[in-house]
Amino acid sequence: MKIFLLYCLRNLKSRRLTTALTSLGMALVVFVFASILMLSEGLKKTLVETGSYDNVIVVRKGATSEVQSAIERHQGSILEAQPEVANSLDGDPHLAKELVVLINLFKRASDKPSNVVIRGVERHSLTLRPQVKIVAGRMLNPGTSEIVVGKNIAERFKGAGLGETLNFALRNWKVVGIFDAGNRGYSSEIWADVDQLMFAFRRPFFSSIIFKVKDSVSFEAYKARIESDPRLTLEAKREVKYYAEQSEIMAKFLRILGMSLTIIFSLGAIIGAMITMYSAVANRVREIGTLRALGFQRGKILLAFLMESLLISSVGGLVGLIFASLLQFMTVSTMNFQTFSELAFSFNLTFEIVVMSIFFSVLMGFLGGLLPAFRASRMEIVDSLRA
């Protein structure tokens, strides 16, 4: 095996240009393949990590997002009195009744409009989300037209910086704080006082109710009870499940789009590898005949040429994966199909994506090199030596 490996490396070295071009072609395909998977994984991670396992979110039955949900005030009072709701340190229910609406803001870079989520929050909204930290300024005062803005929104949209003023719902709202939730969906939101927001938008209902469950084991019983209560017409979900569902449509769309592009590009890469290896076979006919005359079996010849193709594809796969991994330092924004609002997230490289990318590159090399290797192994000794 060591002799064959050295033999393959020597042959690849003698064809530097064609080897490099073929390898770069495969690197491009693996880069596209890995980046699409990383994009989909980054979106999913951003939304899933937004939620907490011990938090429960209640929305209207049939609503696919908070934007489509409506919970009346008397329903909120019923939910607030449920025994499963944990109490905060001051003895009040650890619960927040919130309103979610969309507003239109202009981006700093392109001056183009985009929908942004604005969330009406209560006193416990921040404590229910310990991953959200005020990094500049302060938290808003209840009962005022003050707002706090997610870091991604503050950086990308006009008027959303600390000390600036946004105008929506016929009112001026002053930015008094910037919060950061890391790579989570909250960083793409604006928070305001829920009562002020309901009055400004003339919305007499809440969008969702979030609370910390007292005993995680009792969630299923709580869920069954409130969903069967004819007064409520609501459904309860663990917050992590709710945000996982929010990512499904967009993540599936990205994967389908990415796989379609990858298949098209990979066909070109496989054909390129095949042409390279056929060229190698054509240029080494006498060499193949000599190897056969020295006693090398057909299987050894096939293995040697197939190994060359696999080496080319493996190097290309590693190069493509290395460049794709650099995308983790980038933050991109897109429209969330569930809420039709701006959502910023980062590429996320996982061990599974690394394995899939390497396997995909090796598969391209195998498919591209199989037929040329088979042709080389089927050559007759006499015909090869006469060429």
Image (spheres, grey):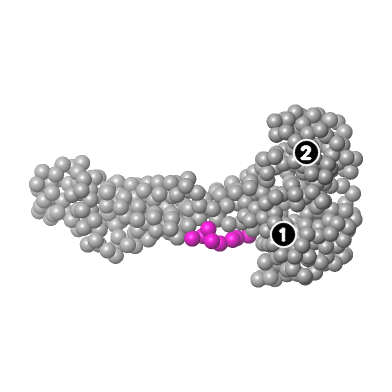
Assign the N terminus to one quadrant of the image: top left
* Residue at the image position 50 percent from the left and 49 percent from the top: 350
Residue type pointed to by label 2:
Ala
Whole-percent x and y of residue 371? 29, 47
Residue 334 left/right relative to 325: right
Residue 208 left/right relative to 340: right
Task: Please state the extent of the stretch shown in magenta in the rendering.
Answer: 326-334
* Residue at the image position 29 percent from the left and 65 percent from the top: 17
> For the view shown, which residue lies furthest in the front direction?
89
Q: Which mark is residue 67?
A: none
Whole-percent x and y of residue 376? 21, 48
Q: Is residue 333 magenta?
A: yes
What residue is pinned by disc 2? Answer: 86
Which quadrant holds residue 19? bottom left
Which quadrant holds residue 14? bottom left
Label 2 sits on a secondary structure element that is loop
Label 1 sits on a secondary structure element that is strand
Q: Residues within 10 Å of mark 1 (few under 14, many from 20)?
A: some
257 or 358: nearer the eye? Answer: 358
What residue is pinned by disc 1? Answer: 134
Of the two numbered discs 2 and 1 on the same chain, state the one appearing first in sequence: 2
* Residue at the image position 43 percent from the left and 46 percent from the top: 355
Which quadrant holds residue 116? bottom right
Whole-percent x and y of residue 82? 83, 34
* Residue at the image position 71 percent from the left and 65 percent from the top: 136
